[in-house]
C-alpha cells in the first residue's frame, strides 16, 4: 500500500483548510444552483414537479464516481512522482466554469438541455472532489480531521448560500445569463487558494502498491459505513427534495426565497456545522445522528401541515425551512462526515471517501426523483408524510448499526 505522508512533511493545517474550503464552497455553488436555485426558477416558470424532479439525474455522476476513483487516485498519487492534486483541480474547475458559461447562454429551458450541460459539469466536479477529499484526508493529521470536516460541511453551506441564495437574487434582478456568468467567475476565484496554495508545493515521492476498490471493500468499517450512509441520507434528504418548489407554490418570489436561502445557509448552516462539531465531541456521532433524524421527522410533519393549511404566515414557514434545511441537516452531516473521515484509509482516501459520497448520491437521486413524482400526483403533504415515515423507520436501524459495529464515535 501507499506510504503515509509524515507529520513534518504536511503543510500547515490552516493552509489546507483554506485550500480545500474554497473548493468545497465552489462545488456547493454548483450543487445549490442545480438542486435549489434552478428548481425554484423552473417552478416559477410554470414547469410541473415531475419534470423538475428529473434534475436529480445530475446526481448520477456523484453516485457513480467510485467507478473511476481508482484511476483518479492512481494518477494523483503515482508510484514515483509528485502529488498531482493541483493538476486535477485546476483543469477540472476551468472546465466547470466553461460549462456554466455555456449554460448562461443556452438558458434554463428546455430542461433536457440544461440537465445535459449540468450532467457534464457534475462529472467533472465529482472527479475534482475525489482529488480534493483524498488530499484533505492525506494531508491532515487525525487531530485536525474535525476542523477539516467543519471546512467541508461549513463550506458546503456557504456554497449553497451562493448557489441557492445569491443566484436567485441575481436571476430576479439581472436575469439568468448574468447570474450564471457570475457563478462561473466565482468558481475560478474559489479555486485559487488550492491551485496556488500548498498543493503547488509538493516533492517527488516513491509509493508502494496502488489504490483499489477491493482494498476499500475488504474493510468492515467501509462496508457497514456504506449502509449507515444510505440510511441516513434517506432520512435527512428525501423530505427536502421538493422544498424549493413547495416554497414557490406557497407564494414566495425568487428574490425573497434567494435571500432567505442565502442567509439561512450562510449563517444558520455554517453555525450549525460548528455546533455539530461541538456536539459530536461532547456526545458522540451516534447520538447526534439519531437526534438530528428525530428533529427532521418533526419538521417534516410540520411541512405537511403547512401544505394543508396555506394561511400560515410566510415568515413562520421560512423559519422552519431554514431550521430544517440548514441547521438540523448541517449538524447531522457534520457527524456523518466525521465518521467518513474516520473510516477512510489515508493511503487511498480518495477511493474510500468517494465510496461513502457515492452512496449519498445514489440515495439522494432516487429520493429526489421519487419525491417529485409523489408530490406531483398526490400533493406535497403526502410527500412530506412519506419522508417522515421513512425517517422514523431508519432511526433505530442507524442506532443499532453504529452501536453494534463500534464505529468511530467522535471526531
Image (spheres, rainbow, N blue to C red):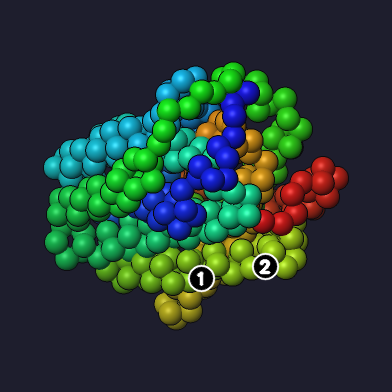
For mark 1, give the secondary structure: helix
Q: Are marks 1 and 2 in contact (CB under 8 Å)?
A: no
Q: Residue at x 75, y 54 (%)?
A: 409
Q: Residue at x 64, y 35 (%)?
A: 345
Name the residue nearer the viewer: 95 or 291: 95
Q: Quadrant of the N terminus?
A: top right
Q: Which residue is mark 1?
A: 271
Q: CA distance from mark 1 to mark 2?
A: 12 Å
Measured as percent of width and height from the top left, residue 79 is found at 49, 19
Answer few, some or many: residues within 10 Å of disc 2's Cα (few below 14, many 20 plus, some between 14 and 19): many
Left or right of 133 in this view: 128: left
Earlier residue among tags 1 and 2 = 1
Q: Which residue is mark 2?
A: 279
Left or right of 221 in this view: 349: left
Residue furthest front in the image: 8
Measured as percent of width and height from the top left, residue 164 is found at 35, 58
Q: Residue at x 46, y 20 (%)?
A: 80
Amino acid at each position: 500500500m501507499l506510504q503515509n505522508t509524515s507529520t513534518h512533511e504536511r503543510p500547515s493545517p490552516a493552509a489546507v483548510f483554506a485550500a480545500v474550503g474554497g473548493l468545497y464552497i465552489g462545488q456547493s455553488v454548483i450543487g445549490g444552483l442545480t438542486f435549489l436555485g434552478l428548481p425554484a426558477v423552473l417552478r416559477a416558470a410554470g414547469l410541473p414537479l415531475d419534470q423538475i424532479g428529473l434534475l436529480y439525474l445530475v446526481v448520477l455522476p456523484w453516485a457513480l464516481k467510485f467507478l473511476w476513483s481508482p484511476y483518479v487516485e492512481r494518477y494523483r498519487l503515482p508510484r514515483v512522482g509528485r502529488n498531482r492534486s493541483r493538476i486535477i483541480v485546476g483543469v477540472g474547475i476551468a472546465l466547470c466554469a466553461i460549462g456554466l458559461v455555456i449554460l448562461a447562454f443556452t438558458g434554463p429551458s428546455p430542461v433536457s438541455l440544461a440537465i445535459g450541460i449540468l450532467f457534464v459539469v457534475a462529472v467533472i466536479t465529482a472527479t475534482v472532489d475525489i482529488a480534493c477529499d483524498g488530499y484533505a484526508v492525506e494531508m491532515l493529521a487525525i487531530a485536525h480531521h474535525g476542523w477539516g470536516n467543519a471546512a467541508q460541511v461549513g463550506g458546503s453551506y456557504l456554497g449553497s448560500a451562493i448557489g441557492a441564495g445569491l443566484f436567485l437574487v441575481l436571476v430576479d434582478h439581472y436575469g439568468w445569463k448574468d447570474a450564471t456568468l457570475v457563478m462561473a467567475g466565482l468558481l475560478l476565484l474559489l479555486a485559487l487558494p488550492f491551485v496556488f496554495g500548498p498543493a503547488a508545493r509538493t516533492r517527488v515521492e516513491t509509493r508502494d502498491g496502488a489504490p483499489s476498490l477491493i482494498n476499500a471493500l475488504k474493510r468492515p468499517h467501509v462496508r457497514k459505513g456504506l449502509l449507515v450512509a444510505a440510511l441516513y441520507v434517506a432520512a435527512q434528504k428525501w423530505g427536502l427534495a421538493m422544498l424549493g418548489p413547495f416554497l414557490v407554490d406557497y407564494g414566495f418570489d425568487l428574490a425573497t426565497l434567494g435571500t432567505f436561502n442565502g442567509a439561512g445557509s450562510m449563517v444558520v448552516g455554517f453555525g450549525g456545522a460548528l455546533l455539530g462539531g461541538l456536539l459530536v465531541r461532547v456526545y458522540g456521532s451516534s447520538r447526534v445522528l439519531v437526534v438530528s433524524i428525530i428533529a427532521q421527522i418533526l419538521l417534516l410533519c410540520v411541512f405537511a401541515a403547512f401544505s394543508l393549511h396555506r394561511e400560515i404566515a410566510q415568515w413562520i414557514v421560512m423559519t422552519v425551512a431554514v431550521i430544517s434545511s440548514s441547521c438540523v441537516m448541517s449538524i447531522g452531516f457534520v457527524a456523518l462526515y466525521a465518521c467518513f473521515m474516520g473510516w477512510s484509509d489515508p493511503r487511498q482516501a480518495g477511493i474510500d471517501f468517494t465510496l461513502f459520497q457515492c452512496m449519498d448520491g445514489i440515495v439522494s437521486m432516487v429520493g429526489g426523483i421519487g419525491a417529485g413524482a409523489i408530490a406531483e400526483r398526490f400533493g406535497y403533504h403526502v410527500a412530506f408524510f412519506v419522508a417522515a415515515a421513512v425517517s422514523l423507520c431508519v432511526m433505530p436501524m442507524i442506532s443499532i448499526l453504529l452501536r453494534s459495529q463500534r464505529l468511530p464515535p467522535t471526531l
